[in-house]
Amino acid sequence: MAEVSDQPAAAAGTLTLGGDLQVRRMGYGAMRITGSGIFGEPPDPEASKAVLRRAIELGVDFIDTAESYGPEVSERLIAEALHPYPDDLVIATKGGLPRTDDGGWYPDGRPEHLRESCEGSLRRLRLDRIDVYQLHRVDPNVRLEESVGALAQLRSEGKVRHVGLSNISEEQLDRAREIVPIVSIQNRYSVAERDDDALVDRCERDELAYIPWYPLAAGRVAENSGPRERVAAAHGATAAQISLAWLLHRSPAMLPIPGTNSIEHLEENVAAAGLELTDEEFEALSRT
C-alpha cells in the first residue's frame, strides 16, 4: 500500500456513508470510460482500465457508475480492471435509467426492472452485494414509493448494502426516507449551478453524502475568468481544480466524483483535494 503522501485523494478528508462505510471525499465518476455519448465501447478499453487503476493508486476509494453507462460497459470495465477489489474500495452504481438503441435515456422505475438491473450490476461488477445502489431517476409513470420499495426489498435480501437517490427533490427525499434509510443524494451541482444549495445544507444536517454530478459543468466552470482566474493564480492551480476545491469547502457532506478518460486529467482532478481555499476566496467564488 502506498504512503498517504503518494495518495493525494487522502487530502480531501473523509465522510461516512450509512454509519459504516468511510470514504475519501474525492471520488471518481466512471461515466466517461465508455464510448462517445456514454454509449458503446470506448475506443481504447485498455486505456480506460488504466485510468481506473490509476485512480486507485492516487488513493480514490469511491467509484460511482451506473448500468446505463454504455450501457453495462462501465460496470464491466471496472470489474475487468480492478477485481478482486481492494478491501477499502466502495463501488456505487445506479439503476432505473435504461438506454434506447440509438443512445437515448428514459426512466424505468418499475420494481421488476429495478430488480433485474440490480442483479445485472451484481453480475457485471462480480459482487455479492452492492455497497451503494441508487435510483438513477424518478419515473413519472411509477409511484416513487414503489420504486424505492423495490430497493428496500433488495436491501433486506442482502443484495444492496445502502440505498441512494439521484436526480431527486427534497420532497421526494422525505418520501423515500419513510420507506428505507437513504445515505446519499446525487444531483447536478457545481460552483456555477447551485439550485441545490438548500439540499446540500440538508444533507450536511442529516449526515447524508451529497454527490455532485457534472461538478465541472463539462468544463464551463474551468474557464479562467474573474475570481476563478485570480484564485487559481494564487494557488498555482487550474480553474478546474479551484472549482473542485470550492465544492470540498462548500460542505463536509460533499463527495465530488469528477470523471475523465484521461490519466492526465484524473491526476489533475485528484490533486485538487490538497487545495485549501480561504473563507474569503470561497466567498468570492460563490458570488460569481
Image (spheres, helix red, strand yellow):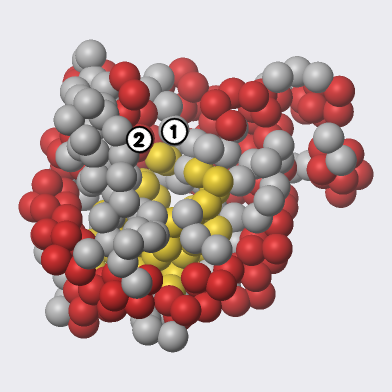
The outermost residue toward the bottom is 178
Does the residue at mark 2 contact the one at mark 1 (Cβ under 8 Å)? yes
Q: Is residue 96 above or below residue 20?
A: above
Residue 201 or residue 39, whichever sits in front: 39
Q: Quadrant of the N terminus?
A: top left
Q: Amino acid at mark 2?
A: Met
Residue 78 or residue 93, whichever sits in front: 93
Residue drawn where x is 47% and y is 64% of the image: 184
Percent across and percent down for residue 287 are 87, 40
- Identify the element where label 2 is drawn: helix
Q: Amino acid at mark 1?
A: Gly
The residue wearing badge 1 is 259
Crowding around mark 1 (Cα neighbors within 10 Å: few <14, some 14 to 19, many 20+) is: many
The residue wearing badge 2 is 31
Compute the Cα span from label 2 to label 1: 7 Å
- Identify the element where label 1 is drawn: loop
Q: Is residue 184 visible?
A: yes
- Left/right of residue 182 with respect to residue 269 in the rendered view: left
Percent across and percent down for residue 211 are 51, 53
Percent across and percent down for residue 81 are 19, 35
Residue drawn where x is 26% and y is 29% of the image: 103
Label whose residue precedes the other's in the sequence (2 or 1): 2
- Left/right of residue 11 with respect to residue 27 in the rendered view: right
